[in-house]
Amino acid sequence: MIRPTDIEVAEVWRESTHVGSITRTAHGSIFEYAADFFEQHAARPGGIAVHLPYSRRRTETLGTNLHTYFAGLLPEGLRLRVLLQNVKTSEDDLLSLLVAAGADTVGDLSVVPQGQTFPRPVPRGAKWKPESVLFTDLFAQSLPRLGTENTEPTIPGVQEKLSASTISFPVSSSGQRDYILKLNPRDKPELVRNEHFFMNMAKQCGLRVATTRLIHDRDGNDGLLVERFDRSWMKAEKHLRRIHQEDACQFLDRYTSDKYRLTCAAIAEGLRENCAAPVPELARFLHLLAFSYLIGNGDLHAKNVSILAEGPGGGFRLSPAYDLLTTLPYGDHRMALKFEGRDDNFRRAHFISFGERYGVNAKAVSAMLDKLCTGAEPWLERLEEIGFDARRTDFLRRTMHKRLQELRAP
């Protein structure tokens, strides 16, 4: 079998359609649309990605061997470290790592070695009962395939700031959904319940969120099953259709290393430019920011804000929220994205002025904040459900109460 580091050309597919190729160069790479695909799409608006327009057949990248969109498909944290170990390459050899990671990446595009046919739809997995397996065994079984199988999914955005050892991996079911299974790292035994609690709280506070379910394995270990929103079941074809998705690093043409350097204003500009109906999506982004500040989610970085394609040429909308949890009990009190020039001590007035600057009127922002505060307050009495010790639970409750007062109307 050819090694990923020996691959000079990789092919890009959108399901069964050959889109183009990525070729290594001495100083980077070149993405080029396939001749037939380019002829059919050159006059159309848009592209296979925000910064890969149909109107430009060749896109050269210098200094790094992947364009920002493709680089953003790579996994992070533990899965990336396993890839590096298996592939035996350097961290900046992004093309080798992406080819090794597999074809079932987030969104609708697949990258495979030259000459390989388009990836077949991932078969429905055998039905399994969580209580009959060990989650750590499931994860261990997935690791040897990483870097050698082109159907092994890669999932970016797994709380790198929180813990480089966060355990998150894809699982298929026998039904009409695909999932991500998240496990607790050893140093944070309550992380899964933390995320499950705040994802449910967010839903009750009016945010559109990914569906999560708390499950337990044979030994009673917690796992969080997160339904993928970049896959949609096609009843007639009996397979999952892939939906184009880009995180803020990708739609702002930035590499993952900038995920903590981007600002809320930069992301808002990207949403205004790319969303089919920008004002409602900017309002939803403000809602996400306010909720994350309230709960102390210091890991809302640029890869944890994504847009989904509405359809061919139909623009984008903000994806359901994901990876919502508090970082306060872990000593991380500041927000990841600068908002109005600050990373702490947000006020109601900041959200109103930010919204007005991007076309969301003050009354709409005020109504959103009022609804958020009303919906959130009862959850402060339920924080013990997460499993933090009394000291950390009390600190979390006091901080959330203080932030509620900062977001409320005077």
Image: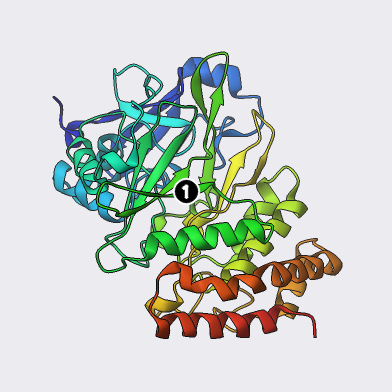
Residue 324 is at least partly visible in this image: no
Mark 1 lies on a secondary structure that is strand
Residue topped by disc 1: 213
**Viewer-proximal residue among 148 and 125:** 125
Q: How many labels does the image show?
A: 1
Q: Dividing the image into 4 quarters, which one contains the C terminus?
A: bottom right
Image coords of residue 349 (percent x, y): 75, 79
Q: At x 44% / y 68%, what residue is drawn? A: 386
Image coords of residue 281 (percent x, y): 70, 52
Q: Dividing the image into 4 quarters, which one contains the N terminus?
A: top left
| Colouring | rainbow
Whether 289 is drawn above or below 97: the answer is below
Amino acid identity at mark 1: Arg
**Viewer-proximal residue among 97 and 149:** 149
Q: At x 48% / y 85%, what residue is drawn? A: 395
Whether 75 is drawn above or below 351: the answer is above
Residue 267 is at least partly visible in this image: yes
Q: At x 82% / y 64%, what residue is drawn? A: 364
Residue 246 left/right relative to 135: right
Q: At x 49% / y 78%, what residue is drawn? A: 334
**Viewer-proximal residue among 159 and 9:** 159
Whether 30 is drawn above or below 320: the answer is above
Q: How crowded is mark 1: few (under 14 residues within 10 Å), some or many (20 or more)?
A: some
Image coords of residue 347 (percent x, y): 68, 81
Image coords of residue 174 (percent x, y): 41, 26
Residue 127 left/right relative to 400: left
